[in-house]
Amino acid sequence: QVQLVESGGGLVSPGGSLRLSCVLSGSTFADYAIGWFRQAPGKEREWVSWVSRVDGSTYYGDSVRGRFTISRDNAKNTVDLQMNNLRPADTAAYYCAADTRKCSIYSEGYEYWGQGTQVTVSS
């Protein structure tokens, strides 16, 4: 049974940084494409970034490109999301998701989801 667990969320001031981690267990991590999504109260879930299972290639949403960096460590079954220059608009619950198919910017493209970790950017 595949399980995803996120960690690293918290309260940070505007301009600050946080590093989120997502650990996958119950299956072979290298078989999975991993995506990060976020959802703010009253808003739809928004895709943030993904990292390929094939070649480690990455892609970012327009709102985070240049500020966020996704990386995977297959030896540790972990995907990290380094978030720099955080803004109040980045406040949301952040979720990692996994699927054995190709990377997707849509929630429907992922079979497994973590429980989420809250990120709050406020002064």
Image (cartoon, grey):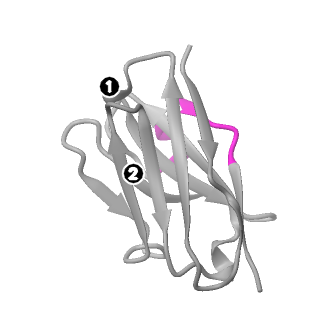
Please report the residue visible at 32 percent of the width from the left and 30 percent of the height from the top: 75
**Residue 107 among magenta residues:** yes
Q: Is residue 118 left or right of 83 when viewed as pictured?
A: right
**Residue 59 among magenta residues:** no
Examine the rendering and report whether any part of residue 50 can be seen.
yes
* Residue linked to disc 2: 50
* Residue linked to disc 1: 31
Depicted 85 relative to depicted 53: above or below: below
Which mark is first along the chain, 1 or 2? 1
Q: How many marks?
A: 2
Depicted 91 relative to depicted 88: above or below: above
Identity of the amino acid at label 2?
Answer: Trp
Examine the rendering and report whether any part of residue 45 can be seen.
no
Quadrant of image for the C terminus = bottom right
Judged from this view, the residue extending furthest toward the right is 42
Please report the residue visible at 43 percent of the width from the left and 74 percent of the height from the top: 62
Q: Are marks 2 and 1 in contact (CB under 8 Å)?
A: no
User: Can you give x and y, in whole percent of width and height, for residue 82 in the image?
Assistant: 46, 63
User: Can you give x and y, in whole percent of width and height, for residue 1 in the image?
Assistant: 56, 13
- On residue 58, the disc is none
Depicted 36 relative to depicted 3: above or below: below
